[in-house]
Image: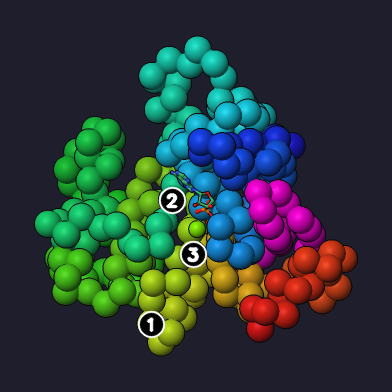
């Protein structure tokens, strides 16, 4: 059974339909890369997956369990939210907290252990992204790439089943994108299930099991990296890929 199943997501803002019926599924341990022009609905799709927006229509299943049922209790909704973690384009770290505190904050608010337990788990996560020596630094003392790696550690802190990234390197200077992409690649190698919106085509090609090309709120084309990048069927996909090279 697929770990993640998205079934016919539709979302409008006012009279603009931004998602026009998006469906896909992803197996546990797979990486999905979503590519597409600006305005095609990629961020809206990720925000719907992370319960920051509610789709107008559609169903969402994780491990076969429906997560968007009408009449959900607050507790059920909280549980559902925890299936997903999101890493934003602009890191969104809390500036007044150290790297370690940023990673510890959510588990602490959710009372997931003693302070010592949470601290050692947060240290472990910072180690995973190669930043143990920066635990006590504040965001303003870190490079963009380091901040984004802290944001990745923070998104992992509540142990989401599916980790989502919204153009995680687009706010970074080119020389800093490599370290962030390497951190994502390492998570893939650990078997993490991930959905990565990216404009880094070479990265998408090398890291993804499945690629979706979105255009105007629909999945224009979906397939393996080889299918999408080496032999795209749709003229729209071909034209998009020509422009992104
Ligand atoms: N909260 C919102 N209110 C109104 N329009 C929105 C909102 N969020 C996104 N949109 C519109 O939806 C479209 C898709 O946006 P988005 O999902 O951010 O696309 P992408 O991430 O692919 O660039 C855009 O036209 C955008 O202006
Ligand atoms: Mg976007």
Disc 2/disc 1 C-alpha distance (Å): 21 Å
Q: Earlier in the sequence, mark 2 or mark 1?
A: 2
Other residues around mark 3 within 10 Å, as few (<14) / some (14–19) / many (≥20):
many
Q: Quadrant of residue 137?
A: bottom left
Q: Quadrant of residue 123?
A: bottom left
Judged by its main secondary structure, the magenta piece is: strand
Q: Is residue 98 above or below residue 131?
A: above
Q: Secondary structure under badge 3? A: loop
Q: Is residue 135 left or right of residue 1?
A: left
Q: Is residue 215 magenta?
A: yes
Q: Contact, CB < 8 Å: mark 2 with mark 1?
A: no
Which residue lies most toward the front here?
15
The disc placed on residue 86 is 2
Which residue lies most toward the left here?
96
Tell me if the residue at label 3 has its CB under 8 Å from ligand 2: yes
Q: Earlier in the sequence, mark 2 or mark 3?
A: 2
Q: Secondary structure under badge 1? A: loop
Residue at coordinates 16% horizontally, 74% vertically from top-left? 141
Q: Which residues are magenta?
A: 208-224
Residue at coordinates 57% horizontally, 42% vertically from top-left? 16
Q: Is residue 42 visible in this depiction of the protein?
A: yes
The disc placed on residue 127 is none
Q: Is residue 117 visible in this depiction of the protein?
A: no
The N terminus sits in image quarter: top right
Q: Quadrant of residue 89?
A: bottom left
Where residue 170 sits in the image (x, y, percent)?
45, 71
Q: Is residue 166 left or right of residue 16?
A: left
The disc placed on residue 167 is 3
Residue at coordinates 68% horizontally, 57% vertically from top-left? 215
């Amino acid at each position: 059974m697929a770990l993640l199943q998205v079934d016919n997501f539709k979302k409008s803002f006012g009279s603009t339909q931004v998602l026009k019926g998006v469906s896909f599924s992803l197996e546990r341990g797979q990486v999905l890369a979503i590519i597409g022009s600006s305005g095609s609905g990629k961020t809206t799709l990720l925000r719907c997956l992370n319960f920051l927006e509610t789709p107008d229509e559609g169903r969402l299943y994780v491990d076969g369990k429906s997560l968007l049922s009408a009449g959900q209790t607050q507790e059920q909704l909280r549980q559902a939210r925890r299936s997903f973690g999101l890493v934003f384009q602009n890191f969104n770290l809390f500036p007044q907290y150290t790297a370690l505190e940023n990673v510890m904050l959510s588990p602490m608010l959710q009372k997931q252990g003693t302070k010592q337990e949470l601290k050692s788990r947060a240290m472990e996560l910072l180690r995973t992204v190669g930043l143990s020596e920066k635990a006590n630094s504040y965001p303003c003392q870190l490079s963009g790439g380091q901040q984004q790696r802290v944001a990745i550690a923070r998104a992992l802190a509540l142990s989401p089943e599916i980790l989502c990234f919204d153009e995680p390197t687009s706010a970074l200077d080119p020389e800093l994108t490599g370290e962030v992409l390497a951190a994502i690649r390492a998570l893939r190698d650990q078997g993490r299930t991930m959905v990565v919106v990216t404009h880094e085509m070479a990265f998408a090609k090398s890291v993804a099991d499945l690629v979706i090309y979105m255009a105007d709120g629909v999945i224009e084309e979906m397939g393996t990296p080889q299918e999408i990048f080496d032999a795209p069927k749709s003229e729209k996909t071909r034209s998009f890929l020509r422009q992104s090279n």
